[in-house]
Image: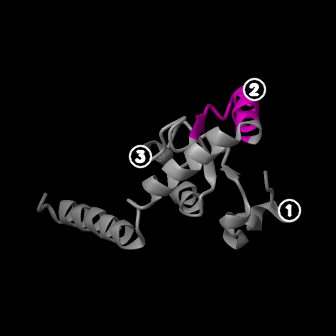
Amino acid sequence: MRSLPRTQPFLLAERCDFTEADLRAHLQVMEEFAGTGVEAMTAGCVSVVPLRGGCVDYAVGGENSLVVDTRDENAIFLAVSRLITDQSFRQRLSCNGLQTARRYTMSKNALSIYLLLARRYRERLGEG
C-alpha cells in the first residue's frame, strides 16, 4: 500500500500524482464537485467517496469505489482498512474504476457543462 506525504493537505489534490497512491479518500459530508474521484480513478487509484452528492453519478460501492457515510467514523475506518488489507479487492476496484473513468472524458464533461448552461440560458429567456 503506497501513500503520499501530507505536508500541505489542502494543496495536495492539485499537486498530486494519483499514480503514486493506491486510494484517494475524499471525506466531506457531501461531495458537490465529484470530478476528483473520477480523476483518481483514471490513475488506477481507488476512490473512497461520500454517499451523498455528485459521486452518486459514477460511484458504485464495492464495484468501482467505496461509498461511505462520512459521518460514521467506524464505517470509514472499516472501508479503508479493507482496502489496506485486501489486495485483490483493492485491485478489482482499481480495474473497475479505470473502466468507469473512461466514460468521463474532458470533452464529454465540457459538452455536458455547455448543454446545461445553454438550457439554463434558454430558460431565462423564456424559450424553455
Residue 18 appears in which quarter of the rendering?
bottom right
Range covered by the magenta-colored residues: 66-83
> Which is in the foreground here, disc 1 or disc 3?
1
Q: CA distance from mark 2 to mark 3?
A: 25 Å
Q: Quadrant of residue 37?
A: bottom right
* Quadrant of the drawing holding the C terminus: bottom left
Q: Nearer the viewer, residue 14 or 97?
A: 97
Report the residue marked by disc 1.
5
Residue under circle 2? Answer: 74
**Residue, disc 3:** 57
Give the x, y percent position of residue 39. 55, 62
Q: Amino acid at mark 1?
A: Pro
Whether 48 is drawn above or below 113: the answer is above
- Which comes sooner in the sequence, label 2 or label 3? 3
Question: Residue at horizontal 46%, vertical 58%?
Answer: 101
Tell whether position 12 is magenta.
Answer: no
3D distance between C-alphas at marks 1 and 3: 30 Å
- Label located before the other in sequence (2 or 1): 1
Query: For mark 3, does the 10 Å Cα neighbourhood hold few (<14), some (14 to 19), or many (20 or more) residues?
Result: few
* Coordinates of residue 92 in the picture (x, y in percent): 56, 44
Horizontal side of 77 relative to 36 (left or right) equals right
Label 2, residues with CA under 10 Å away: few <14, some 14-19, many ≥20: few
Helix, strand or loop under label 1: loop
* Left/right of residue 68 with respect to residue 96 in the rendered view: right
Check if mark 1's residue and mark 3's residue have beta carbons within 8 Å.
no
Amino acid of disc 3? Asp
Q: Residue at x 62, y 31 (%)?
A: 69
Residue 6 coordinates in the image, percent (x, y): 85, 60
Q: Is residue 41 above or below residue 12?
A: above
